[in-house]
């Protein structure tokens, strides 16, 4: 089984002024990230405002995305709390030959490891051809994967549970499973993670750091200088001062006003924060 390796962006979604999903520009944005150096892109993750987008728009995008020349480079997020909607969306994705998924446990409710195992078991049993990357982000879901839970899921479904995106950072240092991908959710963990056996990253800020992150990744495997890593980490630290989605849209809206459009309750940074993020990035000579 092939591991998920490399630099993956949690891609942004692009909206028109009426807040409908602009399918063509969302796909173009994702394809450009691959062109800039990302090994792949996660569609409909939290950065892509997936929880706020209608099911019909998601399906329409999938239909067009299936025609992309980069089709094999996409991870498909779901963005649903509902088990049934998650399964139905995965079945549609699978019918279009998308097999790799990034799935977070449901938000809001309180539950334990055994409940999470039941949740993913139902998914795998319904869509056995899927390959699933677990999304570990306690800040969003309210649940944090334990090493024991991940190990049990992999043992139960070794062909389907193939990796984890670790944005809670409690797994990436100590989770060691053969032929299993561990991808931290921040550029701050990229080089450190590669040194201890992680396979890459999946991050929001790779929407703007794709080239730089790919350089750090390639330099590591080419036994070259780590000189670019400091700048990559400093850029991430600037964005970490703010809501990442708001910061990214604010930053990219300088060049293209369509990035100003966000689905409520999300919004751009206020003028004070906008000024700070742009000044901080200028000091790093990052554009």
Image (cartoon, rainbow, N blue to C red):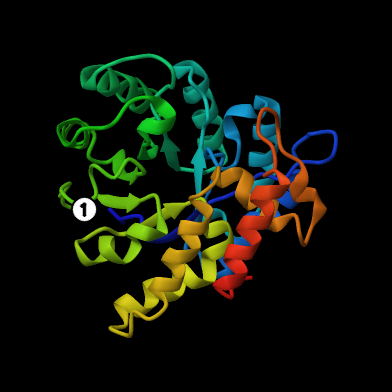
Residue situated in front as seen by the camera: 14 or 95: 14
Q: Can residue 9 be seen from the camera position used here?
A: yes
Residue located 28% across and 51% down the image = 182
Question: Which residue is farthest front?
Answer: 272
Residue located 57% across and 50% down the image = 11
Q: Total of numbered circles in the picture?
A: 1
**Relative height, residue 195 to residue 47 (above, below):** below
Residue situated in front as seen by the camera: 106 or 266: 266
Q: Position of residue 229 (x, y in %)?
A: 39, 72
Q: Position of residue 147 (x, y in %)?
A: 17, 37
**Relative height, residue 3 to residue 138 (above, below):** below
Q: Can residue 27 be seen from the camera position used here?
A: no
Question: Which residue is farthest right?
Answer: 18
Question: Which residue is farthest bottom?
Answer: 224
Residue situated in front as seen by the camera: 109 or 24: 109
Left or right for 137, reference 205: left
Residue located 29% across and 45% down the image = 169
Q: Position of residue 104 (x, y in %)?
A: 41, 31
Dot 1, crowdedness within 10 Å: few (<14), some or many (≥20)?
A: few
In which image quadrant can residue 255 be found? bottom right
Q: Secondary structure at mark 1?
A: loop
In which image quadrant can residue 92 be found? top right
Image quarter hosting the C terminus = bottom right
Residue that badge 1 annotates:
179
Q: Position of residue 241 (x, y in %)?
A: 50, 49
Residue located 70% across and 29% down the image = 264
Residue situated in front as seen by the camera: 54 or 101: 54
Left or right for 272, reference 172: right
**Relative height, residue 207 to residue 87 (above, below):** below
């Amino acid at each position: 089984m092939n591991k998920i390796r490399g630099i993956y962006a949690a891609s942004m979604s692009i909206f028109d002024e009426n807040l409908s999903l602009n399918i063509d520009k969302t796909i173009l944005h994702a394809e450009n990230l691959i062109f800039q150096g990302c090994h792949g892109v996660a569609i409909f993750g939290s950065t892509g405002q997936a929880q706020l987008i209608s099911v019909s728009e998601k399906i329409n995008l999938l239909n067009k995305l299936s025609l992309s020349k980069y089709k094999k480079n996409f991870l498909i997020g779901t963005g649903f709390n509902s088990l049934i909607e998650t399964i139905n969306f995965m079945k549609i994705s699978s019918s279009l030959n998308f097999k790799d998924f990034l799935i977070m446990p449901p938000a809001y409710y309180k539950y334990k490891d055994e409940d999470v195992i039941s949740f993913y078991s139902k998914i795998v049993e319904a869509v056995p051809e899927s390959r699933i990357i677990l999304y570990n982000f306690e800040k969003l879901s309210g649940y944090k994967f334990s090493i024991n839970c991940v190990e049990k899921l992999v043992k139960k479904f070794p062909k389907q549970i193939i990796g984890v995106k670790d944005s809670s950072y409690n797994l990436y240092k100590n989770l060691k499973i053969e032929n299993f991908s561990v991808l931290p959710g921040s550029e701050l963990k990229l080089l450190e993670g590669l040194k201890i056996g992680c396979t890459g990253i999946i991050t929001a800020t790779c929407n703007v750091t794709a080239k730089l992150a790919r350089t750090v990744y390639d330099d590591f495997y080419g036994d070259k200088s780590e000189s670019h890593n400091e700048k990559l980490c400093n850029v991430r630290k600037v964005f970490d001062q703010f809501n990442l989605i708001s910061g990214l849209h604010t930053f990219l809206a300088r060049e293209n006003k369509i990035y100003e459009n966000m689905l409520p309750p999300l919004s751009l940074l206020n003028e004070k924060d906008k000024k700070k993020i742009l000044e901080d990035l200028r000091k790093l000579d990052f554009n």
